[in-house]
Image (tube, coloured by chain):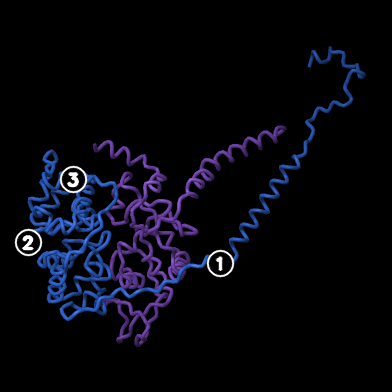
Amino acid sequence: MNKITPLLLGAAGILLFATLMLVILPGWQMRTADAPPALEPYTVQQLSGREQYIANGCVYCHSQQPRATGQTFADLARGWGRASTSGDYAYDSPHLLGTMRTGPDLLNVGARLPSRDWHLTHLYQPRAIFDWSIMPSYPYMFEVKDKAGTDDVVVKLPEAYAPAEGKVVVARQEALDLVAYLLSLQRTYPVSESEAGMRDRGFDAVIDSGKQ
Amino acid sequence: MFSRKKRPAQRVEDIDPAFDPWEQSRPIPLFVIAIFIALAIWGALNYVGDLAPERASQMPELPVTTTVPDNAPAPGADVPVLVHQGNASVWSCASCHGDQGQGSGQTPKLAGLAQAYIVKQLQDFAAGTRSNESMRYVATQLTLAEINAVAAYYATLPLPATAAPETGANMARGRELNLHGDWKQDIPACVTCHGAQGEGLGTAFPRLAGQQPEYLFSQLAAWKGGSRHNSPQSLMDDIAARMSSADMWAVSQYFGSLQPADVK
C-alpha cells in the first residue's frame, strides 16, 4: 500500500468516467427536453393520491414503464400502452418506475380503466372483480355507513361483498385521491421524434428491417 | 547461510546508519482524509434531508383544477339509466367506454356496433367464452332486458371521429392485409367478412373501421393466445394464430385510422 495516491486517483478516475457516461451525459441530454405539451401537471388532489400510492407501497408490485413494441408486443397486447419516454415522467419527482410486475403496469391505467367507480370497487375488494387476484384490499380507505351523505361517493359492490343490512360503503378522501392519481396516469399522446430518439431503439430497427 | 558467514560483515562503518529494514509507515495524505470526511458529512446531510417531512412550502404552486363530473350530458328519456349512472352494483357504461361510446386504449368503441353483436358479446362474457373479468362482472349482473336496452342504445349512437394514430404504423401492410390478406401465411383478406370498408356485417362480424387500435390488437392477441374463443367456427382463432405480432399491430393501426367518413 505504498502507492495509495495513484490507486485512489485511478479509482476516482474510473468512477468519474462512469458517472460522466451514465449519469451526467444522459442527464444533460434530457435536461434540454421540455415536458410534452399534452402532459398536464398533477393537480393537488392527484399529488396527494400519489402520496397514497407511495405510502401503500403500490410501487412494489406495479411498474410504470411499458416496453417498446420492438422489444415485445406483450405490453401492448395487455393494453399497457406505448413505450414510455423521459418526458412522460416530467412531473414525477421521484419517479415511480418500479421494478416488479407482480401486478400490471400502471402508466396508462387512466386510459385503460377510466372509470372512477371501477377503481373504487377494485380498491375496496379486488376479488369482487378478479376472483383470482392477489392484490390486497384497502378497506381502511373506505367507511361503512348506515346511509350515504349528500357528498359521499358510494362504492358499487356486488351482493356477495356488500355490507349487510342495507349499509353502504363510501370512499374516504384517501381513496378518492388515489383514484384521481390513477386516472391521471395516461400517457397516450403521440411521442415527438426527439423524445423517441432518446430511447434505445436498437430492437426496433432490427424488427423493422427484418419486416421490409 | 554459508556465504553470509564468509562475507566480511564486520565493516560497521559501511552500514548506513539511516537504513531501516522495515518499511516506514507513511501517513495517509491529508487531502484523502479530507475527501472522506467531506463525503461522510455530505452523505449524512443528504440522509437527514430525506428524513425531513415533505416541505410543503417548497412545492411549486400547481393549478387547482376542479373535477368535472363525467356524466355531463343529461340523459334523455331514451337513454338507459345504466349508460351514464349504472346501478348499485354495476358501473356505468360511459365511465369506461366514454360519453359518446368512443372507448379509449384497450376499451373498445361501442358506438355503431350492431345490437346483436353487443348482446352476444355480453352473453359470452357471462358464459366465459370471452374472457374479461370486468365485463364478466357487469354482464352477470345485468338482466337480458337491460342488455338489450344498452346494446340498442349503443347501436344507434353516431360514430365519433377518431384521431389517426401518429405512431410509425405500417399502414401499407395493414391495408394490404385488409384488401388481399397474405396467402403465404393463409391469412384471408379482412374485407371478405368484415365488409368492404370494415363496416361490419351481421351478428358475427363487428365493425372494425375506427375501432380503438389497441383494443383490436389486444383481441387479436387474445384469439392467438387462446383467451378468447367465441368466434363462429373458430374463424378468428385460426386466423389470428397464423398472424405475426407485427402484422396484427399493423392491421390494428390501419383499421383504427379509418375515419367513419371513410366508411360511409
The image quadrant where one finds the N terminus of chain B is top right
Q: Nearer the viewer, mark 2 or mark 3?
A: 2
Tag 1 secondary structure: loop
Q: Earlier in the sequence, mark 1 or mark 2?
A: 1
Chain identity of mark 1: B
| Residue B41 percent location from the top left of the image | 68, 54
- Residue at 61% of width from left, 61% of height from top? B49
Q: Earlier in the sequence, mark 2 or mark 3?
A: 2
Chain purple in the figure, letter: A
User: What is the residue that sits farthest to the front in this orientation?
Assistant: B261
Q: Camera-side residue: B256 or A63? A: B256
Q: Camera-side residue: B134 or A68? A: A68
- The amino acid type of the residue labelled 1 equals Glu
Q: Which residue is mark 3?
A: B243
Chain identity of mark 2: B
Chain blue in the figure, letter: B
Q: Would residue B184 be found to the left or right of residue B168 on screen?
A: left
Q: Which residue is mark 2?
A: B202
| Residue B163 percent location from the top left of the image | 25, 57
Chain identity of mark 3: B
Q: Would residue B119 be found to the left or right of residue B216 on screen?
A: left
Separation of residues labelled 2 and 3 (CA atoms): 24 Å
| Residue B184 percent location from the top left of the image | 13, 38
Work out whether disc 2 and disc 3 sit on a shared chain.
yes
- The amino acid type of the residue labelled 3 equals Met
Separation of residues labelled 1 and 2 (CA atoms): 59 Å
Q: Is residue A103 visible to the viewer in this orientation of the structure? A: no
User: What is the residue that sits farthest to the right in this orientation?
Assistant: B13
Q: Earlier in the sequence, mark 1 or mark 3?
A: 1
Separation of residues labelled 1 and 3 (CA atoms): 52 Å
